[in-house]
Image (cartoon, rainbow, N blue to C red):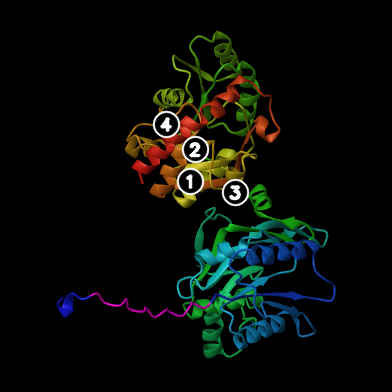
Amino acid sequence: MPKSQAPRKPRKVKELPAAPKLKVTVSYVHSDAGRVTAFEECYVDLVGFDARRHGFMQHEGSRLPIRCGTDGLVAARNSAAVQLLASDSDYLLWIDTDMGFAPDALYRLLQVAHPVDRPIVGGLCFMDRHVHEDGMHGFRTRPSPTIFAARLDDDGVPRTAVVPMYPVNAVMRVAATGSAFILIHRSVFEKMSVAFGPTWYERVMGPEGTLLGEDVSFCMRALELDIPVHVHTGVRTTHYKSRWLSEIDHWRNYNPPPATDEVAVIIPTHRRPQNAEPLMRSLRASTGLATAYAVVDADDPEAAEAWSVAGAEVIASADVEFAKKANLGYAKTSQPWAFLVGDDVKFHPGWLDHAQHVASSLEASVVGTNDLGNPRVMSGEHATHLLIRRSYVDEVGAGWDGPGVLCHEGYRHWFVDDELVVAAKQRGVWQMALGSVVEHLHPLWGKGVKDDVYDIGPDNMEADRLVFEARLAANR
């Protein structure tokens, strides 16, 4: 056998050294007064979650409590930075001791963090902002997100300003944020130390001649060094400021400008005349820009009369399916916006103001509203009641059927909304308006009365799911 054809011994492959495990140090500043119990419970859950997965916090020195002594908060935070740099930890996670947070909050920040592109990523936190004096030596306050932009005032002086309108479940670049729940790569502290010395959290003077907070001052140093600062608005927290503040409180207190565009409220309904009056009463009380179109079964004169008496325009449909009724309602209307909704809802004041403000501020063509029931909806990931721009439907279609089509008619009931939301996300025109509340009075959420109509969705769930998955695969 020629030597070149002789069997060769398998070559031993040199094993590469295992990549070092990422290390995260958690630090918090505390006083002799102790900590909020909620923080302690959340911290235990955070550590337990990590222990069952990758163990980023399972190393010596992973917990770095700093006592706020006579030198104050600035010295305490600077002390943590010194100790981080003396360790081999990759990230510092600041958590204030009056915070509540989810067990996976660190992991969700790590998913988007990057040593260069996103070395500073904060969670979505809120402060109780002083708005004006109340005339009795106190203040009117308002929950506001710790999301700050740098803007020029009338004199061209750069100032930090609160950004109350933000995209839900998104990673956004900001000028500054707080340190209540924030992940910072060690390279940030190293670069600042070289440029400014060990003064990471020393307070700097703002444009109005007052000292900025130590957390905003830290971000100002990052800005000066072109180190990007981000906030992940999907990493939600609560903040105890004599009351617990969260995203819910922010949107309940946020006052958007009035809506300006008319909307066709399309209501595919089936055998539910009793829902007409309460729905229409809440709609009339909420806005004067909406015209309701109840798409009823052609053989149901009782429902047609009930919706007409309640104030809706009635459209008779030979089809009973939700999607077909929705398309018929869309074809019969012409307003610049269409709102697709079931007949078992209650419109809360300001719902249209919030939804249209999100659409205009964040350039959205499909806006989800808050139904106060579905966990997917309340987290901002999904919506069942949708405000949809007519020009968007006419140009590309709301789903994957092409221009002019609102809903795919292959669904018996469920998954109509899934296609609308996913298609909008794919095209970059989706936003959630958590302050826009159209409450779903569904028995699943302990509201409303169970009837046969509610069985249509579950009875056809598997078939509708297969349709959705096939269409999604074909339109990725």
Amino acid at the residue labelled 4: Cys
Q: Nearer the viewer, mark 4 or mark 1?
A: 4
Depicted 79 relative to depicted 35: above or below: below
Q: Is 170 included in the stretch rendered in magenta?
A: no
Q: Which residue is mark 1?
A: 359
The residue singled out by tag 3 in the image is: 379
- Give me the C-alpha separation between circle 2 and circle 4: 13 Å
Q: Position of residue 411 (x, y in %)?
A: 44, 29
Q: Secondary structure at mark 2?
A: strand
Q: Which residues are magenta?
A: 7-20
Q: Identify the residue shown where x is 56% and y is 58%.
A: 233
Q: Residue at x 42, y 34 (%)?
A: 467
User: Is disc 2 surrounded by few (<14), some (14 to 19) or many (20+) residues within 10 Å?
Assistant: many
Marks 2/1 in contact by CB < 8 Å: the verdict is: yes
- Where on the picture, by quarter, is residue 79? bottom right
First in sequence: mark 3 vs mark 2: 3
Of labels 2 and 1, earlier in sequence is 1
- Residue 152 in view (yes/no): no
Instruction: Quadrant for residue 272, please give it.
Output: top right
Q: Are marks 2 and 4 in contact (CB under 8 Å)?
A: no
Disc 2 residue type (three-letter): Leu
Local SS, label 3: loop
Three-letter residue code for mark 1: Ala
Main secondary-structure element of the magenta-colored stretch: loop
